[in-house]
Image: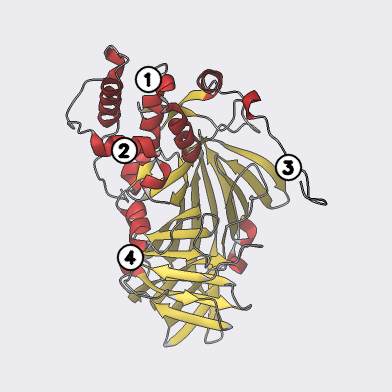
C-alpha cells in the first residue's frame, strides 16, 4: 500500500443473513391486513407499519409493489401463494389508466383543535382548518414527517352584477352573518352565508342571500364547493357572476394554471406582476399547480358541475413566481329576478405527478370519478401519475406479457391444489388476479 493512502475497508459479507423466510413471515404475520376498497370488496395488503402511527393505518402502493417483488422469489410464493395473489390484486386495484393511487386509509374524521372562530379536523389523509366567519377553508395533505403543509386555501369571493346599467362588485366575506359546521359521521359540512346589499341612487338595496357550502368526506379526497345566490324578488339584475376563489397558502408557491380547452401553452404563468383575466369558455377542468413536474410538486384539480357556466379565470400576481389569488368565474347572463343561481365545483389535491397530462386527470375526475370512488368507497387517497410498468415489479410484468388468461375464467387459485410447478403456480395466480380485478362499469361523475 502506498504511503499516505487510506487503508482499504474489508467487509465480511458472509456474516449477512441470506434466509428470506423470516422476513417474509414477519410481513405476513404482522403487517398483512385486510383493507376495504368498496362495498363487499375486501382486499389484503401490507400496511405501512406493524403498529398504527398516531392512530393511522396506511397502505402504500409502492410499499406493496416492493413486497410483491420480494415475494416473487420462488421459495416465497410457493409458501405464500394466496398472500402473493392478494397483494398483486391490491396493486392492480390501485391503478387507473396511467395513474396510480399512492396510498389508501380507513376513514377517519375527528376534531383536534378549536380556538376562537378557527377549528381544525384530522381527515384520513388531510388536515382541514377553517374560519367560516372570514370565509376561509384550508386543507393540506397529511404525512408522518415534515411534508405536512397547507395546500389549498379557499376564500376571497365576490358577486358581480348589473343594475340599472351600472356594474357592481360585492365582496362576500364582509357580508357573512351566519356560519355553521356539522359533522355527520365521516362527512363534514361547512357553511357561511349572509345578505348582500348595495347602494343604488342614494338608497341601500338588498340583492339577496349568498351561501357557500363546503363538503369534505373522510372516505375520499374530494372537496365539494357549492355557491348559491338567492336573488330577492323585488329587484332586477342582469349578467350575474359568482366566484370560487383560491388564495395563496403560506409556503406553497403555485405558478401555473392549465385548462382542458386544448391550448398548447398553460393558461397562466406567474410572471409579470398584476391582474390578468382569461376567458375559458368550453373548459370543464382546470389545475393550479407548481411549475416543476416531479413527485413532490403540489396541484389543485377542479372540475365544474356545470361547465357551460364557467366563463373566465382571473389571477393576481404580487410577487414574481407565485399567485396571490386565483378566481374561477361563473356567468349567469340575462335578466335575473327572484331566481336561485348555483355554481358547483369538485376539487382534489395531489402531491406529485405528470401535470401536463391534463386529459388523464380530467378523465379521472369526470369520467371515472364516481365509478372509481364508489367502487373503492372514496378511499383512494393521494394520486401520483406514473406509468404502471414503473410500479409493478418487473417479474410480474413479464408474467402479464407471457401468459394469456381468458377473461371469463371463474376458477380461483385458493380452491385448487397448488403444486410446486412454477408454470402451474403462475397460471393459477394470474387467473385469480384477472377474476378479481375486472374493470368497473363507467358511470357519470355527477349524479
Dot placed on the residue nearer the N-terminal end, 2 or 3 = 3
Q: Quadrant of residue 163?
A: bottom left
* In the image: residue 367, left or right of residue 323: left
At mark 3, the secondary structure is: loop
Tell me the crowding category of disc 3: few under 14, some 14 to 19, or many 20 or more residues within 10 angstroms, Cα based.
Answer: few
Q: Which mark is residue 8?
A: 3
Q: Is residue 162 above or below residue 72?
A: below
Dot placed on the residue nearer the N-terminal end, 4 or 2 = 4
Q: CA distance from mark 4 to mark 1?
A: 49 Å
Color scheme of the displayed model: secondary structure
For image coordinates 57% across by 68% down, the residue present is 156
Whether tag 1 and tag 2 are in contact, CB under 8 A, the answer is no
Query: Disc 2 designates what residue?
Result: 398
Residue sticking out furthest to the right: 4
Q: CA distance from mark 3 to mark 4?
A: 68 Å
- How far across and how far down the image is residue 22, in percent? 55, 18
Query: Disc 4 designates what residue?
Result: 307
Q: How many marks?
A: 4
Closest to the camera, between mark 4 and mark 2, is 2
- How far across and how far down the image is residue 4, in percent? 82, 52
Q: CA distance from mark 1 to mark 3?
A: 44 Å
Whether tag 4 and tag 1 are in contact, CB under 8 A, the answer is no
Residue sticking out furthest to the front: 2
Query: Disc 1 designates what residue?
Result: 81
Residue 245 appears anywhere in the view? yes
Closest to the camera, between mark 2 and mark 3, is 3
Closest to the camera, between mark 1 and mark 2, is 2
Q: CA distance from mark 2 to mark 3?
A: 41 Å
Tell me the crowding category of disc 1: few under 14, some 14 to 19, or many 20 or more residues within 10 angstroms, Cα based.
Answer: some
Amino acid at each position: 500500500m502506498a504511503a499516505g493512502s487510506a487503508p482499504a475497508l474489508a467487509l465480511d459479507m458472509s456474516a449477512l443473513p441470506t434466509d428470506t423466510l423470516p422476513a417474509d413471515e414477519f410481513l405476513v404475520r404482522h403487517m398483512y391486513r385486510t383493507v376495504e376498497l368498496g362495498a363487499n370488496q375486501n382486499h389484503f395488503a401490507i400496511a405501512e407499519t406493524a403498529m398504527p402511527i398516531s392512530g393511522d393505518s396506511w397502505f402504500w402502493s409502492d410499499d406493496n409493489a416492493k413486497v410483491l417483488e420480494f415475494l416473487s422469489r420462488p421459495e416465497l410464493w410457493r409458501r405464500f401463494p394466496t398472500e402473493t395473489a392478494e397483494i398483486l390484486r391490491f396493486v392492480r386495484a390501485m391503478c387507473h389508466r396511467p395513474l396510480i393511487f399512492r396510498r389508501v386509509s380507513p376513514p377517519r374524521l375527528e376534531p383536534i383543535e378549536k380556538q376562537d372562530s378557527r377549528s381544525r379536523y384530522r381527515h384520513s389523509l388531510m388536515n382541514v382548518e377553517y374560519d367560516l366567519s372570514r370565509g376561509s377553508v384550508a386543507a393540506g395533505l397529511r404525512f408522518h414527517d415534515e411534508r405536512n403543509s397547507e395546500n389549498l386555501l379557499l376564500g376571497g369571493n365576490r358577486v358581480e352584477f348589473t343594475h340599472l346599467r351600472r356594474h357592481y362588485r360585492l365582496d362576500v366575506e364582509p357580508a357573512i352573518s351566519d356560519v355553521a359546521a356539522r359533522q355527520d359521521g365521516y362527512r363534514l359540512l361547512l357553511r357561511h352565508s349572509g345578505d348582500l346589499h348595495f347602494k343604488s341612487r342614494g338608497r341601500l338595496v338588498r340583492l339577496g342571500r349568498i351561501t357557500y357550502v363546503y363538503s369534505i368526506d373522510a372516505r375520499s379526497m374530494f372537496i365539494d364547493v357549492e355557491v348559491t345566490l338567492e336573488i330577492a324578488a323585488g329587484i332586477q339584475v342582469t349578467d350575474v357572476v359568482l366566484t370560487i376563489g383560491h388564495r395563496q397558502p403560506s409556503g406553497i408557491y403555485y405558478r401555473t394554471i392549465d385548462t382542458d380547452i386544448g391550448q398548447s401553452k398553460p393558461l397562466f404563468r406567474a410572471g409579470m406582476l398584476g391582474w390578468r383575466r382569461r376567458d375559458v369558455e368550453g373548459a370543464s377542468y382546470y389545475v393550479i399547480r407548481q411549475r416543476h413536474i416531479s413527485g413532490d410538486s403540489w396541484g389543485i384539480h377542479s372540475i365544474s358541475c356545470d361547465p357551460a357556466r364557467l366563463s373566465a379565470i382571473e389571477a393576481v400576481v404580487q410577487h414574481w413566481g407565485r399567485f396571490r389569488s386565483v378566481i374561477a368565474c361563473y356567468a349567469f347572463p340575462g335578466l335575473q329576478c327572484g331566481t336561485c343561481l348555483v355554481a358547483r365545483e369538485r376539487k382534489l389535491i395531489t402531491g406529485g405527478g405528470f401535470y401536463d397530462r391534463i386529459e388523464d386527470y380530467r378523465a379521472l375526475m369526470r369520467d371515472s370519478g364516481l365509478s372509481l370512488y364508489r367502487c373503492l368507497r372514496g378511499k383512494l387517497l393521494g394520486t401520483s401519475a406514473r406509468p404502471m410498468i414503473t410500479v409493478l415489479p418487473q417479474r410480474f410484468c413479464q408474467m402479464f406479457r407471457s401468459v394469456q388468461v381468458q377473461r371469463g375464467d371463474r376458477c380461483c387459485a385458493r380452491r385448487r391444489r397448488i403444486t410446486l410447478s412454477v408454470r402451474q403456480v403462475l397460471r393459477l395466480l394470474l387467473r385469480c388476479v384477472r377474476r378479481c380485478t375486472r374493470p368497473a362499469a363507467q358511470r357519470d361523475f355527477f349524479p
